Amino acid sequence: MSNYLETLEKRRSIYALGKNVNVEASQIEGTIKEAVRLSPSAFNSQTSRVVILTGESQTQLWDLVAEDLKIEMKRQGVPDEAFEGTKQKLEGFKAAFGTALFFEDTAIVKNLQEQFALYADKFPDWSEQSTGIAAINAWTALAELEIGANLQHYNPVINDSVAKVWAIPENWELKSQLVFGSIEAPASEKEFTSDDERFKVFH
Ligand SMILES: Cc1cc2nc3c(=O)[nH]c(=O)nc-3n(C[C@H](O)[C@H](O)[C@H](O)COP(=O)(O)O)c2cc1C
């Protein structure tokens, strides 16, 4: 197997994450930035934006998610006890070293739609895809450094609070949260759909 495929295999959803990382925070941050920078985007529009939170900010994020989710679950009439399970899960994310928040710059998407009317309906999809590509590249690059990660989606519930605390520009829309840290327990077994179902090859 090529080194690249080996790294792809190494990237898993790791939920037991901690702060015992063996690399400098600056190297983790640099790796995320480089992975995002090197990722492709439609028309090279580079619509993805990333906010990296570690230290106090990491704690603040996951406390904020817990607060906002509790309010949202109450609003939806979910019994208080149900929040306990969610809270445990969120404590797990808080224990991680950091979180990279992935956004899309909607102002660029809007601009592209105006500039290229023919593709106007495609740009939002392409921007989502580009942000997904950026996130997976960051996730995989971290795996190569032996940093575990998992991908969360507490948007849009947390969007307003996140924007307020970290002064996020209005045109940045939150899309995902990549939680990362030391690998405290391996990923669970993964099942693969058979190749027959997934692929068709013609010669
Ligand atoms: C687009 C996308 C959205 C996902 N959303 C979540 C999520 O919200 N929460 C979560 O725990 N995992 C999420 N995952 C992780 C998947 O559940 C996981 O990638 C899948 O089960 C395969 O496991 P692996 O990542 O270990 O290969 C997401 C993955 C992708 C690609």
Image (cartoon, rainbow, N blue to C red):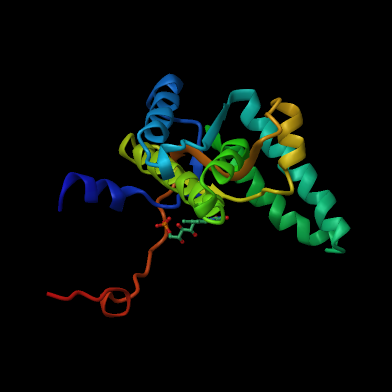
Residue at the location (84% across, 62% down)?
Answer: 76
Q: Position of residue 91 (x, y in %)?
A: 65, 43
Position of 150 with respect to 62 (left or right) is: left
| Residue at the farthest left position | 203
Rendering quarter of residue 21: top left
Q: Residue at x 48, y 51 (%)?
A: 126
Residue 119, how many percent across, how many down? 50, 53
For this rendering, which residue is in front, 166 or 87?
A: 166
Which quadrant of the structure image shows residue 193? bottom left
Q: Position of residue 41 (x, y in %)?
A: 42, 42
Residue at 43% from the left image edge and 45% from the top image edge: 42
**Quarter of the figure that contains the C terminus:** bottom left
What residue is at 54 percent from the left and 50 percent from the top?
117
| Frontmost residue, 115 versus 50 | 115
In the image, taking residue 154 as reference, residue 6 lies left or right, namely left
Residue 159's x, y, as percent?
72, 41
Query: In the displayed structure, does residue 64 sit left or right of residue 179?
Result: right
